[in-house]
Image (spheres, helix red, strand yellow):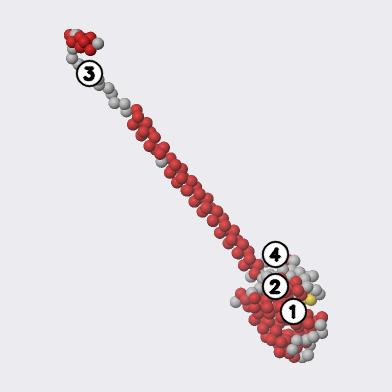
Amino acid sequence: MQKAVDAVRAHPDLAGTTTEHELRWRDRAKPKEQKREEPSAFEWLRNLMRWMNETARLLVWAGGAVLVALLLVGLRRWYRVRGGRGPAQRAHLPSHVQSLDIRPESLPEDIGAAAAQLWQRGEQRAALSLLYRGALSRLVHGYAVPIRAASTEGECVALARGRLEAPRSAFFARLVQAWQLAVYGARLPSAEQALALCRDFDQQLPAAAARAA
């Protein structure tokens, strides 16, 4: 067998080896595909940035809307506390509360001093009535407390507590208590207590003009 192989190799037509060189164009398709794929590698980043921009814009608009709403609520509350009323509201303000006349024109300008004079003349119930009427008038016309014609003393105290600062609310509660004891319990406050209410009246419940000044 080996002799046969050697004989074949020794044949002139099969002698030697040849080397062939083949030239081929470089395949550039793959790099082009890679270049086309390069932008898509950052597509998620662009989407993320786009989403963040949209989210930030929505948050800005939402925050602005919340701020505007809070501002409107605050202005409305301030307007009510300061006694601001429209024409329709002023037209429906009570002139009497439980048969007591609370119209500003029915009251003296210096309510505290007038009540003190009544007390010192021995007209104690008239003095307390004037203080209570004056307080209701100031609350309705000056502080926008939503007191109605049928409101009881307790309801007036509760309504005032929601609109007045603590010192003013406490003063009104003391005044109402003195009024109730005199009317329903036939118990007058001491002269010192009554005159203190007269003295502090215009300080705790000033008229609208005095508060504006």
Which residue sits at x=71%, y=89%? 192
- Which quarter shows the N terminus? top left
| Image-based side of 62 in relation to 18, left or right | right
Secondary structure, mark 1, is: helix
- The residue identified by callout 3 is 20
Q: Nearer the viewer, mark 4 or mark 3?
A: 3
Label 3 crowd (10 A; few <14 / some 14-19 / many >=20): few
- Looking at the image, is mark 4 or mark 2 earlier in the sequence? 4
In the rendered structure, are the residues bearing label 1 and label 3 in contact, judged by CB atoms less than 8 Å apart?
no
Q: Is residue 10 above or below residue 46?
A: above
Q: Alpha-carbon distance for marks 4 and 1?
A: 30 Å
Residue 89: % across, % down = 71, 65
- Looking at the image, is mark 4 or mark 1 earlier in the sequence? 4
| Image-based side of 72 in relation to 23, left or right | right
- The residue identified by callout 2 is 160
Q: Nearer the viewer, residue 76 or 184?
A: 184
Amino acid at dot 4: Pro
- The residue identified by callout 1 is 176
In the rendered structure, are the residues bearing label 4 and label 3 in contact, judged by CB atoms less than 8 Å apart?
no
Residue 180: % across, % down = 78, 80
In the rendered structure, are the residues bearing label 4 and label 2 in contact, judged by CB atoms less than 8 Å apart?
no
Q: Alpha-carbon distance for marks 2 and 1?
A: 11 Å
Label 2 crowd (10 A; few <14 / some 14-19 / many >=20): many
Q: Alpha-carbon distance for marks 1 and 3?
A: 121 Å
Q: Alpha-carbon distance for marks 3 and 2?
A: 111 Å
Q: Nearer the viewer, residue 117 or 48?
A: 48
- Looking at the image, is mark 1 or mark 3 earlier in the sequence? 3
